Image (tube, rainbow, N blue to C red):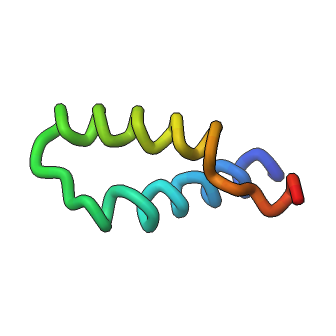
Amino acid sequence: MFDHIFVERLWRSVKHEDVILKGYATVGELMVGLAEYFAFYNGERPHPSLG
């Protein structure tokens, strides 16, 4: 149950912080953009739970 909540929260963040803002025109652009976003999300983006 909790896994589903975390996945939904992740995809909401991806959609609102990256996909909608950048409006990718091709699947190739989307793949590159998502790779960059996940690198940012995992390495640089401040997470509330980490203080």
45 up-or-down from 17: above or below: above
| 5 displayed left or right of 22 | right
| 22 displayed left or right of 47 | left
Quadrant (top left/top right/bottom left/bottom right) for the C terminus: bottom right
Residue located at (53% from left, 43% from top): 40
Is residue 4 or residue 31 the one in the foreground?
Answer: 31
| 11 displayed left or right of 3 | left
| 49 displayed left or right of 32 | right
Is residue 43 or residue 28 the one in the foreground?
Answer: 43
2 up-or-down from 21: above or below: above
37 up-or-down from 31: above or below: below
Q: Position of residue 11 (x, y in %)?
A: 52, 54
Residue 13, quarter of the rendered image: bottom right
Residue at the farthest front position: 44
Residue located at (45% from left, 63% from top): 17
Residue located at (33% from left, 57% from top): 19
Q: Position of residue 15 (x, y in %)?
A: 42, 60
Is residue 7 or residue 41 the one in the foreground?
Answer: 41
Residue 47, quarter of the rendered image: bottom right
Residue at the farthest left position: 25
Q: Position of residue 3 (x, y in %)?
A: 76, 45
Residue located at (45% from left, 44% from top): 37
3 up-or-down from 35: above or below: below
Q: Position of residue 14 (x, y in %)?
A: 47, 55
